[in-house]
């Protein structure tokens, strides 16, 4: 009898959820809209109707497997410059109320807008039309804590104290901080943009973080005392963690068309733990000299390699590199990163340390060579090497301000060979287990999502 009653209650929740609409609004960058889309998938799996508003001048590739979220593409010529955010808001001020009205007329109750934390103005638009608002932080909680500390005036820029001491974080060197805090000339407006995430945070109804409790326990507890934080990470397709969402094999949207078959065929022909995977994300731009150093390292290495080089960067490769390394390496313009990282042949990941890529590698237990370039990547690399101990961080040559071939080679050896490599692999397996536990049924992130669903029903 109790079991029947439980089923009736669950069915009732699902019926109410199916009448509730959530709107998700990401920034059109791969590392931002991928976690937003995956959170949307999980909410849709609970019975919610989810509409993702994607505003960009360039339409993205949609996977045929991803059908649980309605993606509404809004074509808008928004150049990614200093006016980008204002134009984004101008479009949203028009499109969001119209979308809410259309959905309401179709019989759906729009209850909440989940938006990228870098778009705090969305909360004001949502409140004006009478719906709840919840930011999703796609950077780590630790990095967010740094920007919050600057926003509150507790860390002055330019930074003079050494080391930098922030509650909940280990002592940080100046170059362990996000680049916007130590390279003020290169990024004159970015720091204000990042700090403004906290301008109206106390007015948000919920605050989502793409992390999990055990990964950033100390800083999360500190921030939870001030904000209504909900950890929902790792926000990667659940097929890599459990099987609860059918066909949830990829994020569903890609900035570039992935070379699926060529990658899979090539990886399938390699031995277990024999391939170095190299990728620097969708935004990082390498100098021609830096590309030469990476290419030289991979060419002389004793390991197979898979290197993602975007089409716009192919011209910076040394001439004939692809042909001369065809027996040991594969160069592709884009790939399904999760399929690559989860493949048995992958031994280590040479990465820019973007948060989404870092979470993917942590969740799949892949050791990392951190080669950060800008933004939060420097801080993530610090935690990869010294806090979670799942990889190493390259050292920059002070004279040329770049990473030399020999340094990259040394770091790859450290994570693939010898005693330190064994310790890194052991730690990587530990965090993989903890990531899976967080999102498994009854885990911390899973419970948080369930509690959010229950509150939305009210």
Image (cartoon, rainbow, N blue to C red):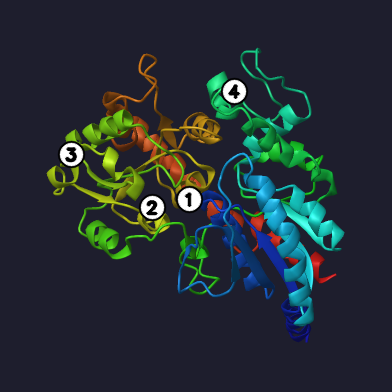
State if disc 2 and disc 1 touch (CB < 8 Å). yes
According to the picture, the residue beneath numbered tag 3 turns out to be 319
The label number, if any, that marks residue 341 in the structure image: 2
- Secondary structure of residue under mark 2: helix
Identify the residue at image location x=53%, y=49%: 31
Q: Quadrant of the N terminus?
A: bottom right
In front of the other: 97 or 4: 97
Position of 230 relative to 186 (above/below): below
Q: Nearer the viewer, mark 4 or mark 2?
A: 4
Mark closer to the chain start, 1 or 3: 3
According to the picture, the residue beneath numbered tag 1 turns out to be 360
Query: Which residue is farthest front?
Result: 77
User: How far from the left and from the top, in percent, is residue 375?
Assistant: 55, 34
User: How far from the left and from the top, in percent, is residue 409?
Assistant: 27, 30
Whether residue 234 is visible, yes or no, is: no
Whole-angstrom CA distance, mark 3 to mark 2, is 28 Å
Q: Nearer the viewer, mark 1 or mark 3?
A: 3
Mark closer to the chain start, 4 or 1: 4
Mark closer to the chain start, 4 or 2: 4
According to the picture, the residue beneath numbered tag 4 turns out to be 184
Position of 236 relative to 386 (above/below): below
User: How far from the left and from the top, in percent, is residue 350?
Assistant: 37, 39
- Secondary structure of residue under mark 1: helix
Identify the residue at image location x=81%, y=40%: 225
Q: Nearer the viewer, mark 3 or mark 2?
A: 3
Mark closer to the chain start, 3 or 2: 3
Position of 101 relative to 396 (above/below): below
Q: Is residue 107 left or right of residue 27?
A: right
Whole-angstrom CA distance, mark 4 to mark 2, is 34 Å
């Amino acid at each position: 009898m109790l079991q029947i009653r439980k089923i009736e209650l669950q069915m009732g929740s699902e019926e109410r959820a199916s009448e509730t609409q959530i709107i998700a609004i990401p920034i059109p960058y791969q590392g931002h809209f991928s976690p937003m889309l995956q959170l949307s998938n999980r909410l849709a799996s609970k019975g919610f109707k989810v509409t993702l508003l994607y505003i960009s001048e360039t339409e993205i590739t949609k996977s045929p497997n991803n059908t649980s979220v309605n993606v509404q593409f809004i074509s808008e010529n928004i150049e990614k410059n200093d006016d980008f955010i204002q134009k984004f808001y101008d479009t949203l001020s028009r499109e969001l109320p119209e979308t809410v009205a259309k959905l309401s007329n179709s019989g759906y109750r729009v209850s909440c807008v989940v938006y990228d934390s870098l778009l705090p103005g969305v909360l004001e638009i949502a409140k004006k039309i009478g719906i709840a608002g919840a930011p999703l932080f796609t950077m780590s909680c630790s990095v967010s804590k740094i920007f919050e500390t600057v926003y509150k005036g507790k860390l002055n820029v330019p930074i003079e104290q050494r080391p930098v001491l922030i509650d909940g974080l280990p002592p940080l060197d100046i170059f362990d901080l996000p680049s916007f805090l130590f390279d003020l000339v290169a990024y004159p407006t970015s720091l204000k943009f990042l700090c403004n995430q906290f301008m109206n945070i106390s007015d948000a109804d919920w605050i989502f973080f793409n992390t999990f409790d055990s990964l950033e326990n100390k800083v999360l507890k500190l921030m939870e005392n001030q904000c209504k934080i909900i950890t929902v990470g790792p926000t990667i397709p659940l097929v890599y963690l459990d099987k609860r969402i059918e066909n949830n094999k990829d994020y569903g949207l890609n900035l570039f068309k992935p070379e699926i078959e060529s990658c899979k065929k090539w990886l399938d022909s390699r031995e277990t733990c024999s391939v170095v995977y190299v990728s620097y994300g969708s935004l990082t731009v390498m100098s021609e000299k830096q590309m030469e150093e990476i290419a030289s390292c991979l060419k002389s290495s004793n390991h197979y390699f898979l290197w993602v080089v975007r089409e716009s960067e192919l011209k910076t490769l040394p001439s004939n590199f692809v042909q001369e390394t065809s027996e040991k390496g594969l160069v592709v313009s884009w790939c399904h990163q999760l399929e690559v990282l989860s493949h048995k042949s992958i031994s280590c990941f040479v990465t820019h340390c973007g948060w989404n890529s870092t979470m993917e590698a942590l969740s799949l237990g892949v050791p990392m060579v951190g080669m950060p370039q800008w933004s939060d990547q420097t801080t993530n690399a610090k935690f990869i090497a010294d806090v979670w101990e799942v990889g190493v961080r390259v050292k920059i040559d002070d004279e040329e301000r770049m990473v030399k071939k020999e340094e990259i080679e040394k770091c790859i050896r450290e994570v693939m060979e010898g005693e330190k490599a064994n310790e890194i692999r052991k730690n990587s397996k530990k965090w993989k287990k903890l990531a899976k536990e967080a999102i498994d049924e009854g885990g911390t992130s899973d419970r948080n999502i369930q509690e959010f669903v229950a509150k939305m029903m009210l």
